Image: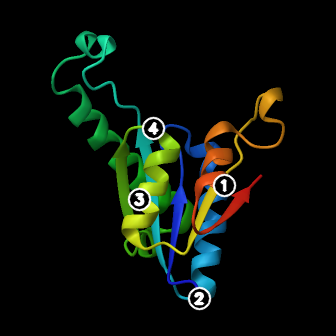
Amino acid sequence: MTRSVLCAVDAGKPESDAEVLRQAARLADLDDAQLDVVTVLPDFGESFVSQFFEPQHHEHAIQQAQQALEDLSKSVLGEGRSAKIRHVVATGSAYQEILKTAQSAGSDLIVIGAHRPDLKDYLLGPNAARVVRHSTVSVYVVR
């Protein structure tokens, strides 16, 4: 029995992740499980690139991503269902943050989109492939 489902989406591309969110909600509803939705922002941290951004840039990006997650949930699943979802914005490497969020949320299942792979990745995008390879829980890949 699934108690918690984590759905990983790219908040910057809601049109490509609407079906991923629909599938995650369907799977969560089968067992009346908690649905969490996560998006990951890149971390420029102390790198050379960070000096080109204003100090409050990252906080503003987090707020925008949070709003985008909530808007995506409302538009795809409706306002009532969206109110029951935990929306999480993480910062760092996408696959690592997805796995970390799944572990801290106690997720039994991760739902992720395949996202246009390069030829070298063959069937899955690089983040989806890494999540599948390194996850300790089941991963459902939406194509």
Rendered image: mark on residue 132: 1
Which residue is label 3 attached to? 101
* Viewer-nearest of discs 2 and 1: 1
Q: Is residue 140 above or below residue 53?
A: below
Residues at circles 1 and 4 in contact by the CB criterion of under 8 Å? no
Nearer-N-terminus badge (1/4): 4
Is label 2 in a helix, a strand or a loop? loop
Q: What's the CA distance linking mark 2 and mark 1?
A: 22 Å
Is label 1 in a helix, a strand or a loop? helix
Residues at circles 2 and 3 in contact by the CB criterion of under 8 Å? no
Q: Nearer the viewer, residue 140 or 135?
A: 135
- On the question of residue 71 being in view, the answer is no
x and y, in percent, of residue 140 in the image: 69, 64
* Amino acid at circle 1: Val
Q: What's the CA distance linking mark 1 and mark 4?
A: 15 Å
x and y, in percent, of residue 135 in the image: 58, 59
Nearer-N-terminus badge (2/4): 2
Which residue shows up at 46% across the image and 63% down it? 102
Residues at circles 4 and 3 in contact by the CB criterion of under 8 Å? no
Which residue is label 2 attached to? 31
* 33 on left or right of 15: left
Which residue shows up at 43% across the image and 43% down it? 40
Which residue is label 4 attached to? 93
* Amino acid at circle 4: Ser
Nearer-N-terminus badge (4/3): 4
Residues at circles 2 and 1 in contact by the CB criterion of under 8 Å? no
Q: Nearer the viewer, residue 121 or 134?
A: 134
Q: What's the CA distance linking mark 1 and mark 3?
A: 15 Å
